[in-house]
Amino acid sequence: MAISGKSRSAVFYGGVPQASELPAAVVVNAIPGDPNGLIPTEYLYHPIKIQLEKIWRFPALDRETDYVHFYIKPHTPEPEYPLPPIPLQGPLTQEKDFPVELSIGGNWLKISGSYDIRYEVDGPGGLEQSPHTRTFTIDWIAPGGSAPMLPATFVDPEIAEFGVTEEYLSTHPTIEVLIPTYFDRQPFDEVPIFLLSSEDANPFEAVYIHTFTSSTEPLKVPVPSSAFRTLQSGPRALRYTLRDRAGNQRLDYSGPTPVYIDLDPAPSGLKPLSIVAYDYDGRVDRGDARQGVTVHFGAYFDWKSTDDVVVSWNGIVLAREPVTGFPKTVAVDWATLIQKGYVQTHFPVQYFIYRAGSSDGVPSPIRYIDADFRVAGQDHEDAPAEYNRHLAKVEISGGGSDTPNHLDFNDVDKPVTARVVLFDDPKVGQWMDLYWGDVEEAVARYQVKAGDVAGAIVTFPLIEWSAIADHIANNPAFPVTYRTSNGVNEQLAPSQTVNINIVPPVKFPPPEFLHAENSWLHCQTSPPLWEGVHVRVNKHIAIQDKDELRLRWQGTLGFAGNRPIPETSEVFVEPWAPIDDTRGYHDFIVPYLPYVQPMKDNGGAMAEFSVWRKGVRVGSSQVRYVKIDRKFATSPPVYCGPGGPGPEGAVFK
């Protein structure tokens, strides 16, 4: 709440500090948890940052100015001294302006030591002092001062006597070295260790850095054994230097500690990975993923049968595998390929060779490659498979029948229309290619246009009949599908089944009643009726091997289809076999019971057949009629049958 100047004068008395609850200032870059508020030296080359967390009771209003006064007191007999005041323009509020970060500096930043800092605020609202101080420490002096650093010694005398051997490393994960004591030792001092090719070599990069968390623990540094594998066999050297928690590092190094290395040579001469999927067309895509993405490399120097390899693919570490021979191939699965996204550019791929007993791998040169796994349309759970069951089926209609997914002779020589529900998130430049049956080339392409939206029904360019005429035949389930494409990856939609029946059915000649005399079957017919009626289908140019013949039989009480007998109705189905093609006919034998026996007194039968190929009717025959009469004598009525003549006809015995 804003307070007027009149209200303030009733509360404050010029220049007299009032009781305050302001917290201590915060030294922003002091190491958290350090009891002395140590500031790393990297922050001391510029004014240090101080944060005030809470606003004072009567902050500056609009067009007013408060001044923050900081006071520094060294942890020495030297008195406290003020720093130049820092102005803060009003209006000030806790919500808008706090915590506020200020900077203080001066030549005192170059003087090592501990300091207390406090502050007070002076302004139109009066003078308010924080009752708290904050301690911080500045340290510009590296451990040990300028005293020479004596050489380290190996804790285990076996190292000094026999050197570093394969046998020793196999049982010792670390090799301890003892650092001589030094001046001004502090908690969290660090010891960088350097392994050198000779005593005269210049230390460049530490192989290990050890931190002593207290100033009283033994000065033993456990150097990882694997670090010694970076050295070639022969006489070598170890040096160290010192660095404190503030970051002050000695500019000199210890005296050399000689060490003899007697190890097998490390793997060398590693060549970059070969990535066939990328080397072929300059990118890794879904087509590559379907075939299986692999990386491989050839032989390198000093290979051992116990070596292992770890491949790093865009920072993803693959499982460790043994290197049992060359070329060594490592597979990269789909989950790894897409872990960093569906489009990845200029990312690193390399491998590391690990030797038994070593925790550090020898790296190969890095290759940088690109990958693109994006698709046109919605993705699916079976990726990277091309078939996507979530894509809509295309709808086909002819120019004559105009019936969905149906083509007949009315559509011949007329354009065919294909429509489909557009896939998700369509983008200009993507397209769909339509495929007709097993024709390899697309018969139509729909290009996504500006304004196209997912779920809209779009139409392919008309498909001219001439484009499909050589690839169309009667088929009740002809497949038509499409592929989506973004120019890199494709997806295959489920096939639409189109009922095609464009060839007019063949009109076959009627079947023959093989043993009928003048279209009459009777008691003297041979073979006799009770051995079955032979119905013959003759060879025809339109009948092919394995076509299905369907013979329809119907018995009647009269002739020429008059008064059909329901119990005698049947369709007999048999294939046209190669032997039928050789002899020129196929014979059906219609059983006597129950299909012939009821026709005993001037009865008859009718027969016709149809030919089917792969579920499609090729054509049908005309009907053939035959008279069937089993009357043997008229007075009294006697009928012939398998049991001989009798009044009731034949009954099997």
Image: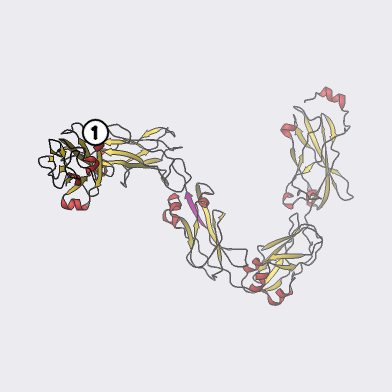
| Residue located farthest toward the bottom when viewing the structure as drawn | 161
Q: Position of residue 439 (x, y in %)?
A: 30, 46
Q: Is residue 542 visible?
A: no
Q: How many marks?
A: 1
- The answer to whether 100 appears left or right of 605 in the picture is right
Task: Determine if the magenta segment contains residue 377.
Answer: yes
Q: Quadrant of residue 56?
A: top right
Q: Nearer the viewer, residue 466 or 301?
A: 466
Q: Is residue 59 visible?
A: yes
Q: Position of residue 461 (x, y in %)?
A: 32, 36
Q: Quadrant of residue 449?
A: top left
Q: What residue is rendered at 45% in x and 44% in y?
A: 375
Amino acid at dot 1: Asn
Task: Determine if the magenta segment contains residue 632.
Answer: no
Write the start and end of the magenta stretch as one range.
Answer: 366-378
Q: Nearer the viewer, residue 390 or 179?
A: 390
